[in-house]
Image: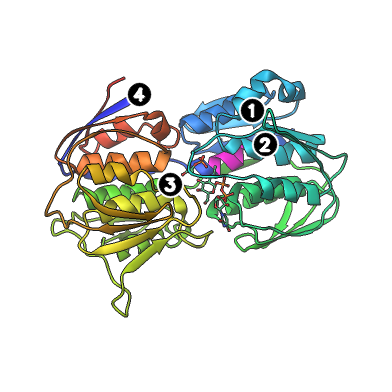
Amino acid sequence: MGTFKIEGGHQLKGSIQPQGAKNEALQILCAVLLTPDLVTIHNIPDIVDVNKLIGLLKKLGVKVEKLAKGSYTFKADALNLDYLESPQFKEDGRGLRGSIMIVGPLLSRFGKGYIPKPGGDKIGRRRLDTHFEGLIKLGATFRYNREEQFYGVEAKKLKGTYMLLEEASVTGTANIVMAAVLADGQTTIYNAACEPYLQQLCKMLNRMGAKISGVGSNMLIIDGVENLGGTDHTMLPDMIEIGSWIGLAAMTKSELTITNVSWDDLGLIPNVFRKLGITVEKRGDDIHIPAHNDGYEIQNYIDGSILTISDAPWPGFTPDLLSIILVVATQARGSVLIHQKMFESRLFFVDKLIDMGAKIILCDPHRATVIGHDFKSTLKAMTMTSPDIRAGVSLLIAALSAKGTSTIQNIEQIDRGYENIDERLRAIGARIERVE
Ligand SMILES: CC(=O)N[C@H]1[C@@H](OP(=O)(O)OP(=O)(O)OC[C@H]2O[C@@H](n3ccc(=O)[nH]c3=O)[C@H](O)[C@@H]2O)O[C@H](CO)[C@@H](O)[C@@H]1O
Ligand SMILES: C=C(OP(=O)(O)O)C(=O)O
């Protein structure tokens, strides 16, 4: 189990370039299965989940070549579909959440898609019903082996149809889109998720020859085509990393510039941090956070009532940043209610922040009230374990703001989604060591 040792209480300074987006990468990599032609992808983050997926694609027979750091070519012209029925696949597929998105492309191009219950963060129930209900609507037959938790769909040829998704599932929409692009006729997906990741996927598929309209909205209309060709694609910067660095800057009173953030794709993220009283300056395509030496003050609503920050499907505020918002609020001036609507086990990490001296009331599994210290009391250094990727980074931010030396165990969770985080943080002055 890897561990970070962190000496907190120091201001950081400098600029940091966000990595390519993890959750976009997982969709885009699965899309290479849709064509026998060459697909070139740039700005792929070097993180555990992405590398696991690339490893899985290789075992499926995809030819992968590294061109440079973050740039690879993929060619899925001779796949080894027997791998899908091997014990090894059952192990590999479980290793991450993103593997679920190989099902749609395999089903539409080869007539069958299998997957063991995928992994990812243990942050509450994470059902796959939306994925499979959509694929069944397109004409697939569905099997589920409860004992092995193994899912399978098969179809000779998918047929376009109208569907209204029960929920705007991100990976579910990606899976259904990748199935529908090669189906016969027209598919309409209403209540589709529309995150920038999905917009990027749809734009890439259109460059490959797909006919998708409504990109960026919650109604996608897809006219099926016979086949798709190769393309070049560049990943957006990771908006969750960008939000993490905004929080880090505020909480450590540091002046930081986050470079090339693709402002137009950040949605509500800058404004939600502003509601906590943090100055988020737009400088060209960079974000500049000045040192908050006098702290930051949470804004109330117009009527004076306490601010609530909650998650919602895009263009609402992403659930993946609520843990960061929560930790940053522990040093704000004022109080805020954090409402994590989507996941039921994502707030339990607050017990560690409470042990560090933060004033938080966990009202129920979905809601926590934070009463900020306004830096009048610093958090205490601690030994803690990272329960999931975003809680892990939140604890890391707390440790960097705390006085003394903290230890964070189980940092594999953080490495799952943040590239070389210790080295990049050291470059802006953080005192962090990987000790195992
Ligand atoms: C690999 C990947 O891309 N993972 C992301 C993806 O996961 P993933 O695609 O697995 O998440 P989903 O969008 O399917 O759903 C997330 C959770 O929100 C609930 N839900 C969803 C939509 C809705 O309208 N109402 C609702 O309650 C679902 O029941 C589920 O519990 O999207 C999540 C939601 O942004 C992010 O946290 C994950 O980081
Ligand atoms: C929940 C997350 O990831 P995953 O869906 O891969 O578990 C995340 O990126 O915050």
> Which residue is pictured at 79% across the width and 34% down the height?
112
Percent of width and height locating residue 83: 72, 21
Q: In what element is the residue under mark 4?
A: loop
Q: Label 2, label 3: how many angstroms apart (C-alpha)?
A: 26 Å
Discs 2/4, front: 4
Q: Mark 1 and 3 residues: CB-CB less than 8 Å, in contact?
A: no
Graded by Cα atoms within 10 Å as few (under 14), some (14 to 19) or many (20 or more), the crowding at tag 4 reads: few
Mark 3 highlights which residue? 346
* Among numbered discs 4 and 3, the one appearing first in the sequence: 4
Mark 1 highlights which residue? 57
Q: Mark 2 and 1 residues: CB-CB less than 8 Å, in contact?
A: yes
> What residue range appears in magenta?
24-30
* Among numbered discs 2 and 4, the one appearing first in the sequence: 4
Residue 87: quadrant of the picture: top right
Mark 4 highlights which residue? 2
Mark 2 highlights which residue? 102
Q: In what element is the residue under mark 2?
A: helix
Q: Does the magenta stretch include residue 208?
A: no
Asked whether, in this view, residue 116 is left or right of residue 405, the answer is right
Q: In what element is the residue under mark 1?
A: helix
* Among numbered discs 1 and 3, the one appearing first in the sequence: 1
> In the image shown, does 337 or 219 lie closer to the viewer?
337
